[in-house]
Image (spheres, grey):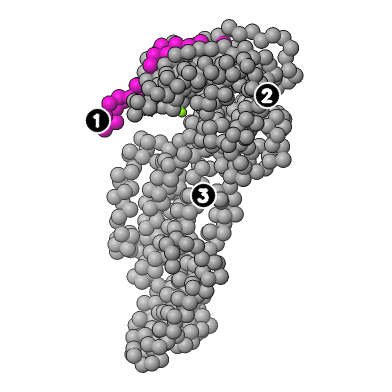
Amino acid sequence: MKPLAPISSGARIALGILFFVLFVAGWAYATFGGFVSKTFLADPLTMLEEGWLLLTKHGFLYDIGITIWRVVGGFTLAALVAVPLGILMGAYKPIEAFLEPFVSFARYLPASAFIPLLILWAGIGELQKLLVIFIGSVFQIVLMVAVTVSAVRRDLVEAALTLGARDRGILVRVLIPASAPDIAEILRLVLGWAWTYVIVAELIGSSSGIGHMIIDSQALLATGQIIFGIIVIGVIGLISDFLFKWANRAMFPWSLA
Amino acid sequence: MGEPRDVPVEFGVSKLVIEDVSRVFPPVHGGHPVRALEPTTLTVGDNDFVTILGPSGCGKSTLLRLIAGLDTPTTGKILLDGKPVKGPGPDRGMVFQSYTLFPWLHVADNIAFGLREKGMPVPERERIVAQWLDNIGLRSFARHFPKQLSGGMQQRTAIARALANDPAVLLLDEPFGALDNQTRSLMQELLLGIWERDRKTVIFVTHDIEEAIFLASRVLVMSARPGRIKADLRVDLPHPRHYTIKTSPEFSALKARLTEEIRVEAVLAAEGH
Ligand SMILES: Nc1ncnc2c1ncn2[C@@H]1O[C@H](COP(=O)(O)OP(=O)(O)O)[C@@H](O)[C@H]1O
Ligand SMILES: [Mg+2]
């Protein structure tokens, strides 16, 4: 292997799949071989069986739907607030000076630590779940968008100025379109994090969702179900990431090499 | 645009007046302030094509940015058509050395940018854009993004984008500096062709002596840092100019003279570093 030397796309896919195969093989070996107790870790076949039962008998599809709804809802709210705010912070230095210190502080507040407080304020209904995701995402998006907007190439702004653009024109027709692909990329990244918040929110005080199912399964020692739930989250995350990437590519053809 | 004029062009009506303009950049991190431009006085006539020649770092870009209003002079003032320059505006179009087309806009929309900012109605805008696409020979690239264009095509578009706005003065900061020699000389002919028809007032910064002579009706030579104007030559070569003029005796004489002027400055600049 040479540093940074490219590999063929066939080899790339094969190597990627190989890891999954080895992983499942290791898991199967450990469980079927009797090295780990069934109580602690279900084997792959049991996992699939329990997963199938979850989907067909226990309405797990509904839980999946609820969880997706929460992530998308909370994340959309966060994006609606954070993207405009981030753009204003990036474009106008006084606004940045006003908000940046607070937002930088707030982004380190762990969203999960707010859950008890949010339960007191908003109960254990949907609003509380959405708020957890909102708090977890909004500050991150604001800061990253602000950085992106303030890093727009200065010479593009100057070119626009010499073409007669005024403040509003610079904001609307230079800063925003120039940073749009990066903003979309930020949203993709933060959506991935939002998935981790929703599960935490559902582990505590919830009666539906993937996280709730996982907690229920723990009480029943149904490790197969837990693992199935975790894998479902991973797969949904992967799909949403793929869709986001695809949409970004379709929306911003000019930013591709 | 329009037909070539057969009336003789009048020089001497001053379009742009630069009075005692200097620029000192404040020190950074306890260093020394940088005197980028010594107090400079200069008058540019209407319809003149002025090239500014000087070694790198002598303050050419600084002077151009001051005229564009992208920077403010430390002393002195700049008047365009008698009115003081206060900031950037559409009456001073600029073409930069770096490629500054808006990457998210097609070639046609890039050319239309200034017209749009002016609030010009779409049909008129489209007519002007179509004309400029023809002028720069990029009609079939109207729907291409800047990334899909060569460097020469991008700079052609940048020139069209600035001129479509019909500025009083066109400022160009080493626009062909990053192009290969062949492309560069084609671009010079294209720009000169446009100027011969339009007779816009142009200020063109370069460090290439042949380019400076070929394009100019007047060449200014700047001294090494801190920059000031140390020579001011008229170029009376006839128009329309063809690239073969570069081998004429008059051209060679000018070139020899400017080479000498520049050499002295280049030596000084090299010693200064
Ligand atoms: N924004 C700035 N801050 C500090 N120094 C600068 C700045 N811009 C230019 N300079 C300095 O001013 C001098 C002239 O620069 P410039 O006008 O770009 O030269 P040229 O275009 O002739 O190569 C250089 O020494 C450069 O380092
Ligand atoms: Mg320069």
| Amino acid type at mark 1 | Gly
Q: Amino acid at mark 3?
A: Pro
Q: Secondary structure at mark 3?
A: helix
Residue B244 shows which numbered tag? 2
Nearest-to-viewer mark from 1 and 2: 2
Which mark is nearer the camera, 2 or 3? 2
Depicted A244 relative to depicted B271: above or below: below
In front of the other: B92 or A97: B92
What x and y, as percent, mark residue B15?
56, 12
The disc, 1 or 2, on the residue closer to the chain's N-terminal end is 1
B207 w.r.t. A112: above or below: above
Q: Which residue is rendered at x = 37% and y = 20% of the image?
A: B226
The residue pinned by badge 1 equals B30
| Quarter where residue A125 is shown | bottom left
Left/right of residue B238 with respect to residue A122 in the rendered view: right
Q: CA distance from mark 1 to mark 2?
A: 52 Å
Is B44 displayed left or right of A111 in the figure? right
Q: Are marks 1 and 2 in contact (CB under 8 Å)?
A: no
Beta carbon at label 2 within 8 Å of ligand 2: no
Picture disc at residue A55: none
Q: Which residues are the magenta region? A: B20-45
Chain letter of the residue beneath label 1 in the structure image: B
Q: SS class of the residue under badge 1?
A: loop
Q: Could you classify mark 1 by the number of other residues whose Cα lies within 10 Å: few (under 14), some (14-19), or many (20 or more)?
A: few
Subunit of label 3: A
Element under label 2? helix
Mark 3 lies on residue: A181
- Name the residue at 53% across, 12% down: B233
Name the magenta segment's main secondary structure.
strand
Residue A56 counted in the magenta span = no
